[in-house]
Amino acid sequence: MSAEKILAVDDEKDFCDFMVAHLQRRGYTVENAYNGADALQCIQTRGPYAVLVTDLNMPQMDGVELLRRGRQHDPQMETIVISANDLIEKAIAAMREYGAYDYLLKPLVNNNELSMAVGRAMEYRRLRMEREALQAQMLADAERLQILIANTGDAILATDDEGKINIANPAAIQLIGQGDLIGADAGSALPRPLATLVANWKSAGGQRAAVVEVPWGPNSVQMVSLTPLPPGKNSKNGGWVMVLRDVTHLKRLDEYKVRLLAEAANRIQVPLAQALTNTVELNQMADAARSEQFTKTVYSLGRSLNQIRKWMDELILIARVEAGIGVHSEMLNVPSLVQEWAQAAIKKQNKDKSLGLNITIEGGVPPIYADRDLMQRLLQQLLDQITAATKPEPGRAVRISVRHQEGQVWIDVTLEGFPIRRTDPLRRLTRPAPGALAAGSMAPDLSLAITIAHGMGGQVWVRDQELGGSAIVICFPSMKR
């Protein structure tokens, strides 16, 4: 039998007993009362009842009054009223005014009318209570989220599909210094560093979560997490959520660690160079008795030592760029710089019989302010990243394009099928996809490229390509002509 109870009420004892017997045969738990006062007493002391089935026309307390007072005590109780033909209007009024679920006419045309009406009422009550519970849970979750957003130390901003700011917690308002952010257009309301960041992110596709360091004032750095939101039903473009965290102290700690590593690398440069020299001399020794395995071991040792030397050089360069040492920025013509670098890179690529290069340069690209040597090193790092993560195939070529868009000079380095996982945030793109390299090999990463780009005011992005693969993209603020 059903665990939920039904209360059947009618001043006609025979009809009331009939309702009880019929519903019990259908598996319901049923109690009865022969007048409105007793029924109300049952509701107040023996409830709750899932469904109240009551006659309308009863002495002392009629069915409408019982319905009204019973629902006041238990708003979740559903009610079915039973009336004679001449009381149909009263039954309908009870449904409209006091929320009765259904009404039946006495005498019943079919006994099953009663059990079917009760079944529908119980199912409706169950669904309504589930909906109310879900709504209450959603409201509680929303309230907890609002409390969390309001009291977190991180600045949080979000926009709708139209680019209007719809969330700005107190930390964001304090950081930006503007109190009327809600409803404002993000492109015009955000400070220039954040507006430029969002514009660059959208230009790079706006489909990936991004984590970017943004200078904030003369002595501060904000770590900005930018995440796309799915679009609504009638929109093609979704909004975004931005979280800003002050990482100045972490940045200084990183700089201190890099400086210590650079100092350590400097200290071992001389003995490492001597080890490389000794390895070369050992390999050149004329010894007819040495085995083929000996030659392979010496060659492998030399290659490993050379890779360590290269890593130390990059580490020292990262430290210097981070500290601004040896960076000589000037006005650079990017198209000329890329073509000059490409000529040397093509010669090296042809010598190594690896990937080719295709260069595309749009007209009217303005100059940027950057270090020439570092820019060439940056381009080589991007090319090394791709060639290390892919196998050379006949006819394949890396495409490098230079263009100008929204005050930024963009350099795209693209290869179809270049393996970058969609789940990787941009800042973590520092290693090739698993399985792309032979076991034991050491791949160049994007850490140096990201450091060089950031050191000259640029940003590193990844754009998904329509035909597959990904493009590593860098952008720099252009100089006005």
Image: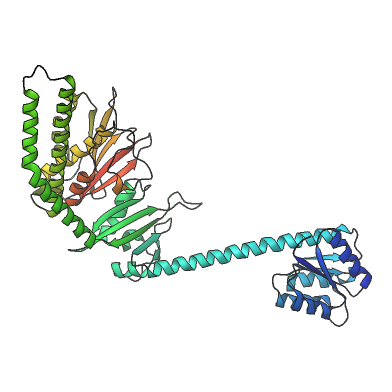
Left or right relative to 452: residue 196: right
Which corner quadrant of the image does residue 9 belong to? bottom right
Can residue 122 be seen in this snapshot? Answer: yes
Direction right: furthest residue: 14
Q: Which of 439 and 446 is in front in this view?
A: 439
Q: How many labels does the image show?
A: 0
Residue 146's spot in the image, x, y percent? 44, 67
Q: How is the image coloured?
A: rainbow
| 131 over 438 or under it: above or below | below
Q: Give me the residue at 75% from left, 78% from top.
A: 45
Locate residue 251, reporting x and y percent: 21, 58
Picture coordinates of residue 60, whole percent (x, y): 86, 83
Instruction: Specify the quadrant of the image occupied by residue 467.
Output: top left
Residue 218 vertical placement versus 286 (above, below): below
Give the residue displayed 30% in from the left and 47% down from the top.
428
At horizontal 24% and vertical 27% (from top left) the residue drawn is 355
**Residue located at (38% from left, 70% from top):** 151
Q: Residue furthest front?
A: 289
Q: Quarter of the image containing the N terminus?
A: bottom right
Relative to the observer, which residue lies in front, 167 or 405?
167
**Occupied quadrant, residue 145:** bottom left
Locate residue 220 relative to residue 187 in the image: left or right: left
> Residue 196: x percent and y percent?
27, 55
Horizontal arrangement in the rendering, residue 81 relative to residue 186 (left or right): right
Q: In the picture provided, is 393 more to the left or to the right than 289? A: right
Whether residue 456 is visible to the viewer of this picture, yes or no, is no
Residue 474 versus residue 90 in the image, above or below: above
Q: Is residue 371 above or below residue 36?
A: above
